[in-house]
Every structure is written in C-alpha cells, then in structure tokens.
Image (cartoon, grey):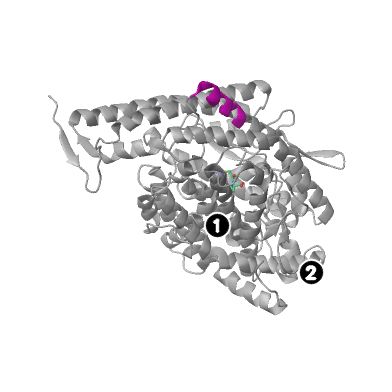
Amino acid sequence: MKRWLVIPLLFSSTFCLFSEEKVNEAKKFINEAEERLEKKWIEAERINWIYQTYITYDTSLIASNVNEELSNLTMALIKDSTKFTNVIKDPVTDRKFKLLQVSVNLATPSDSSKSSRLAKVATEMESIYSTGKACVDGKCYSLDEAIKILADSKDYKLALKLWKGWRDAVGPKIKPLYSEYVSLSNQGAREIGFADVGELWRSRFDMPSERFLEVVDALWQEVKPLYESLHCYVRGRLSDYYGDDLVPKSGYIPAHILGNMWAQDWSNIYQIIAPPEFRRKMVSIKESLNKKGVDEKGMVKYAENFFVSLGFEPLPDSFWERSMFKRPRDREVVCHASAWNIDMKDDLRIKMCISITDEDFKVIHHELGHNFYQRAYKDQPPLFRAGAHTGFHEAIGDTIVLSITPSYLKEIGLIEDIPEGWDLPFLLQLALEKVVFLPFGYLIDKWRWEVFSGKISEEKFNERWWELRKELQGIAPPVERTEKDFDPGAKYHIPANVPYIRYFLAHILQFQFHKALCDLAGFKGPLHECSIYKSRKAGEKFIEMMQKGASAPWMDTLAVLTGAREMSAKPLLIYFSPLKKWLDSENKKYGYKCGW
Ligand code: X8Z
Ligand code: ZN
C-alpha cells in the first residue's frame, strides 16, 4: 500500500514527495548507478593508462571509445536521476544524487555522432599536446626537455625561441579542435540543466555557482598585495640583470624569462634575483640528490617515507612494479605528471617523466598525496571516492612539501649542514613557487569560464588570454601574438579538459592544513620552520580527514582538521609575513615603483 506525504516547500512551488517506496526506489537507483559507474570507471582507467603510457593511433582510438562510453553512461544516469529530484531522501542518498549530477568529466551530447566526435576531439587534443616538439634552430625538443633548458637558461634569446617554439608546435593545431570541444561540451552541459560547462564545473563546491565566484575572488583579493610586492621586487632585479631595454622597471615582465614555460613558478630564477648572501644560504635538493646518487625511484622512496612517518601504510609492491617514473626512450607518452588508482582500491600508480631536480622532488610528493588520499577513502561508496573538493585533492601532497624544511632534509641525511640565516632565502624561494602561482591558478579558469559562457568568442581567444595574463600576473608576451596563435592550448590542462581552479584553492588550503597539522604536532615557532615529519598526532587527524573522501560537504571535512568551515588565506599570509616585510623594505631601498 502506498503511503504518500506531500510537503509543500516554503517559498517554493515544487512539491516534495516522501514515501518509503519512493525513497527505496531512489536508493536502489543510486546504488545500481554506482555499481555500473564503478565498473566503467575501472575499465576506462585501465585503457587510459595504456593510452597515456603508449600513445599510438590504436590506443588513442580505444581510449576515446571508452571515454565516450563512460561519458554517455554518466550523462544517461544524470538525466534519469532527475525523476527523484522531489523525493526527500536520507542525507547519504541525497548527497550521492547531488554528486552524480555534477560528476561528468566530458559532457557528451545525446546525439551519438556528436558524442563520438567530442570524445575524439578530446583525445586528439591531448595527443597533440603530449607529442608536440619545440623546435629551435632546426633541433626539436620534447616538452620536458624544453622545460629543463628553460629552467637553467639565462639567455634571453634562447629562452624566447623555446617559448615560441613550444607555442608554435601545439597552439595552432589545437585551436580549431578546442572551438569544437567548447561547442559540443556546452551542448552536453545544457542537456543536464547547466547554462554551460563553466557552470557545471563551478557547481562542484557545495555552494551555488555564483557564490563560488565570490569566494574565489575574495581569496585572490586577500593575497594580491603579497603578489604585488613579489612582482615588484622580481621585476626590478630582472631589469638590473637584463638591462632596462629588455626588462623595463615599470609595466609587465616578459613572460619567457621567468624560468618556466608558463611563468607559473619562478623559483628557477632565484639565482638571478636573490641577493648574493641569500644565494649562498640556499639549500639545493638537486645537488644533494646527485651527490648521493639518488635516482628517480629513490626520489619517490623519500616521498613515501614521509607519508609512512605520519602513520600511512607503505605503498604496495604493485605501485613500484606498475608506475612509470621515467620517459620511455622508445615511445610517445603523456608526460604530464598524474596519480592513478586503477581498481579504485589498491592498484595505485604514478606516471611521471621525473627529472632529478628540486621541482620534481616536490611534484613527486604532490602525486603521492593523491595516491594516499585515494587509498584513504577507498572504503567509501564509489560516488564518495573523491576529494572533499578537488582543491583538497591537490593540496594533500603540497602540504607535505611545506614540511620539507632544512631541518627535515638534515634529519633524513639529504643535507649535512643547515645554513645560518636560512629563513628569508627559503621563504623567497618558496614564494617564487607558491605566491607566484596564485594569479596563474586563478586566470586559467577565469578565461575558460568566459569561453564556455560565450563571453569570449573564438576571434578573441588569444587576445583575452593575454589581457588576463597582464591584468592578473603582470606579465606580457615577448613577441607579438595574434589569433593564429592559441597560447592557452600550450598549457596541458586546457587541451586535456582538466579544470584548474582546484590548484588555486589548493595553494590556499595547503597553508591552512599545514598550520593545523603543525599545531597538532605541538610545534611552536614561525610556521615556515615547522615540519610535521614523524608526527603521528598530525598524521592521525590528516588521515581522519582524508578517509571522509567526498562523503560530506567540504566545509564539514575542513572542520575535522582545522576547526574552520571556510577556506582562508590567513595562514598563507602569516607564513610569508617575514618575507612581505623584507620585500617591502627592499622595494623601498631600491626605489622601485610597484604595480603595472
Ligand atoms: O598538474 C599538476 C600536477 C598534476 S595534478 C602535476 N599541477 C599543476 C600544473 O602543473 O600546472 C600541480 C600544480 C599545478
Ligand atoms: Zn595533482
């Protein structure tokens, strides 16, 4: 017998239906959906692993096929799920429905020719990016080779050739595909009730999409003064190094001389911009690794050891057998670093083309953060096997990176002596990585949100990209750019369809996590001196937070570790406060006029 209870919602014309039978139907639906999705996810992960570690015509084809199948299945389930919208469910079931409705990665349209085209376009863009070569004076380099040369190059002209070579190699080829991708995936997003793909992406943060925009912008406004002080100092020092004609003391910094292909991390130019007494006090992980003869796998062991010291279980043997640590010599692969959990249980792997550098030592910790998170939430139901939000996922390993202090490096025997007065040199180096990243982390999706919403048309893709690069980062292209160029396409996450605001949020969150963990570890003193290495107390709470996965709104999960329910830039600002003071006094001393 049916028992209906109809509750008219206050301020709403919709009616909510509550009957045991309806609720059970909803539960059955979502449990079956999870089962089917899990099966397809695992199949897709396996095929994508093969494709990404061996790019050929055939592997691209089967990858695009399975990705299409997964997208089509997810889209169909999302559409079906709407029949339970007005059913009042228990909190767990309700959350599962909510997560399902925003879970599609590539929103394929229902028209099958369009969905298969979209899946092909997506794979094609990633392949073009991953197999692209930057050619300079007749010699061609893979992206990781070009990155390495650019990191060490202080030669303005060579850096320019590499910078342009990489963009020429991939941008124009990707541009027409990107336009197609925008149009097709927007069609898919509309079919499931979103205005466009940007709105779908922004709806994954447990708050209305408009509120999310405000939260992000408020965080950026809070950290902007710190970025401006750093920009000012770096521009002045670069101008002294290269001369006023190449780097004027006002306006934008040329984007190619910052030691990084995308100017998202400037730590490689430390040796040019830091005062001489700072340079002597710098700790070089690369030097220590080379001195000790540590290889790629050895670097990963160091990272694993840190997590184990906190109480995480060591990685399984299969991790060491199945991961890809080096660029293979005989085939094309997707070198952009990633972490996988192929069976959603224990088949953890990373895929990286590791260089023995300080940067990659940190990226390895970043990737293992993903793996340890995946394992921590593996016993949750499939829809909850994800980060509290994607920014959490990106922040775990980076939080550990903040504990790679000189005293930690000494404790594990990587360095012998801690240089006297290491604090400011260390903070400057880290700010070139973490603070510099903030406007970059924001602008990538600021640009994409505008593209998806139609605010920027295809004729203005590159123009708007550089407007944002100028406005937010204070950098400019070193040569004229036109709409024949497609510079956004030269950054992995754009052709690879990976949302980027997660990294901006992670750069805020990791300082919040670090502060909370240091408190738990009983650390007293300046935040940048704290390492949580070997602190079981910190580890316990960290694991407790990670085990929750996506089972609760991220505010609840954040509170588990930090006691706070909002993302806050305060810990980051506190962390860098000694540096901010120093930068402002240096800028004054040199008489630099800040801003652009
Ligand atoms: O893509 C990554 C990771 C994989 S999730 C290596 N990151 C962003 C990037 O490289 O642009 C980490 C920091 C930002
Ligand atoms: Zn990551």
Q: Position of residue 512 (x, y in %)?
A: 46, 59
In space, the residues marked 1 and 2 are separated at their CA atoms by: 31 Å
| 102 versus 259 height, above or below | above
Residue visible at 54% across and 25% down in the picture: 114
- Find residue 484 and report its image quarter: top right
Residue to which mark 1 is pinned: 402
Q: Where is residue 441 in the image (x, y as percent from the top left)?
A: 57, 52
Q: Which of 547 and 489 is in front in this view?
A: 489
Left or right side of 493 for 109: left
Q: Which of 552 and 376 is in front in this view?
A: 552
The numbered dot on residue 240 is: 2
Which secondary structure lies at badge 2?
helix
Mark 2 CB near ligand 1 (8 Å cut): no
Query: What's under tag 2, amino acid-wise?
Result: Asp
Magenta stretch, residue numbers: 111-122
Left or right side of 176 for 111: left
Could you tell me if the residues under marks 1 and 2 are in contact, i.e. CB atoms within 8 Å?
no
Is residue 104 in sight in this rendering? no
Query: What's under tag 1, amino acid-wise?
Result: Leu
Which secondary structure lies at badge 1?
loop
Q: Quadrant of the N terminus?
A: top left
Q: How crowded is mark 1: few (under 14 residues within 10 Å), some or many (20 or more)?
A: many
Q: Which comes before the other along the chain, label 1 or label 2? A: 2
| 410 versus 342 height, above or below | below
Left or right side of 589 for 493: left
